[in-house]
Image (cartoon, helix red, strand yellow):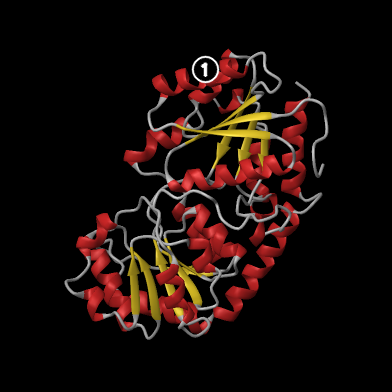
């Protein structure tokens, strides 16, 4: 189903959880749906159930009786009340998971939000997961027996995967707008595979002690580094560190991650193992150093090191700290000792992801199935 030509069109209302790591994959999936002839509209809801339900109802009612009524609410799994709205109006409800299928770990402060994703999962018409079947075969097979699960990933711009959507090279929306020119200019002056890219996403907050250890570990390594330190975290850096290391490293508040990872200068990605970041690294065959923080990240780090063999995980000491010596050792391991092995393994997973998104691949078939069922309503 390269494009939909039926008289009626699937019109999907996408309800996005308003953080960067949830916005990007859903927007990209909407773009994929549009490329196949469906219509989509994204609703960004900064407030939750009470206001959100009313807002969705208003949007649905605006389209009632028109030539393009909304036929499905696709809601972030962190917003399970979206299904209640869908049921109220007699349309399809599709839960959208931005994590892998095997989400197993969580932290107390996050537990209710994480578990809430599953509160009415058995009632959803579709459970869409940003992964590919080949990455998590056993888990997908088990979950598919419990709910109508469809793997539809990776939700990464088509330019980096299957190139089937013209001009699709970036996600198109950032909560942290930044001029990338100084970053790309700096990278262009560095030798191939000579830069350690360091970023822990938009939500993780490291302790001052951990940031200091990371800073001195990066300094003691012999490699250049590009380090994303959000404005709210800058005060935790050692005094004068950015100026002292100006010749060796570049510290920025945010960056266009896909563009950075695609640079020839990048040798590895020091990451929290967020799912989006991990998929992006796999697609661009960049080895990983995992320093997971919470939720699905410890599990993803295990997959990176143990199953996929595309990187390593740093070791935490008895005090819960990752020392600078450990950081230096892992950087050397990934940048020198095992770099070729990790890159070759990543390329194997990239090939599988390309096949999944190509015409007739596992994810492509699932996306077609999703649209077809909505059209038959």
Can you tell which quarter of the image residue 128 is in?
Answer: top right
How many discs mark residues in the rendered view? 1
Establish if 289 lies above or below 122.
below
Picture coordinates of residue 133 (x, y %)?
69, 49
> Which residue is drawn at the image coordinates 56% and 42% (left, top)?
26
Position of 277 compared to 201: left or right? right
Q: Secondary structure at mark 1?
A: helix
Picture coordinates of residue 83 (x, y %)?
55, 23
In the foreground, 37 or 75: 37
Quarter of the picture containing the N terminus is top right
In the foreground, 121 or 78: 78
> Which residue is drawn at the image coordinates 33% and 70% (left, top)?
251
Can residue 141 be seen in the rendering of this structure? no
Picture coordinates of residue 166 (x, y %)?
70, 54
Position of 223 compared to 16: left or right? left
Picture coordinates of residue 153 (x, y %)?
64, 49
> Which residue is drawn at the image coordinates 34% and 82% (left, top)?
248
Quarter of the picture containing the C terminus is top right
Can residue 128 be seen in the rendering of this structure? yes
Task: Categorize mark 1 by other alpha carbons within 10 Å: few (<14), some (14-19), many (20+).
Answer: some
Disc 1 target residue: 57
Establish if 232 lies above or below 211.
above
């Amino acid at each position: 189903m390269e494009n939909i030509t039926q008289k009626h069109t699937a019109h999907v209302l996408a309800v996005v959880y308003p953080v960067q790591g949830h916005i990007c994959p859903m927007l990209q999936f909407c773009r994929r749906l549009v490329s196949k002839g469906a219509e989509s509209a994204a609703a960004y809801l900064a407030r939750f159930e009470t206001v959100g339900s009313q807002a969705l109802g208003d949007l649905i009612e605006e389209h009632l009786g028109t030539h393009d009524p909304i036929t499905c609410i696709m809601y972030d799994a962190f917003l399970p009340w979206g299904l209640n709205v869908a049921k109220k109006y007699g349309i399809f409800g599709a839960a959208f998971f931005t994590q892998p299928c095997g989400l197993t770990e969580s932290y107390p402060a996050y537990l209710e939000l994480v578990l809430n994703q599953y509160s009415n999962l058995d009632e959803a018409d579709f459970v869409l997961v940003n992964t590919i079947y080949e990455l998590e075969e056993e888990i997908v097979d088990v979950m598919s027996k419990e709910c109508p699960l469809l793997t539809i990933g990776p939700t990464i711009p088509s330019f980096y995967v299957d190139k089937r959507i013209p001009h699709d090279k970036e996600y198109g929306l950032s909560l942290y707008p930044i001029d990338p020119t100084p970053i790309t200019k700096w990278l262009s002056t560095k030798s191939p595979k000579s830069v350690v890219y360091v970023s822990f996403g938009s939500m993780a907050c490291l302790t001052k002690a951990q940031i200091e250890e990371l800073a001195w570990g990066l300094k003691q390594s012999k490699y250049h580094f590009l380090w994303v330190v959000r404005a709210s975290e800058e005060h935790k850096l050692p005094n004068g560190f950015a100026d002292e290391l100006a010749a060796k490293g570049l510290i920025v508040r945010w960056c266009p991650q896909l563009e950075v990872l695609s640079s020839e200068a990048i040798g590895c990605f020091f990451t929290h193992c967020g799912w989006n970041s991990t998929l992006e690294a796999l697609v661009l065959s960049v080895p990983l150093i995992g320093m997971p923080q919470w939720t699905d990240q410890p599990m993803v780090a295990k997959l990176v090191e143990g199953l996929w063999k595309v990187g390593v995980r740093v070791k935490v000491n008895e005090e819960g700290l990752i020392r600078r010596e450990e950081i230096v050792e892992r950087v050397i391991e990934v940048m020198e000792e095992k770099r070729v092995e990790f890159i070759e393994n990543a390329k194997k997973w990239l090939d599988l992801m390309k096949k999944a998104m190509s015409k007739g691949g596992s994810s492509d078939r699932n996306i077609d199935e999703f649209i077809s069922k909505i059209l038959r309503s």
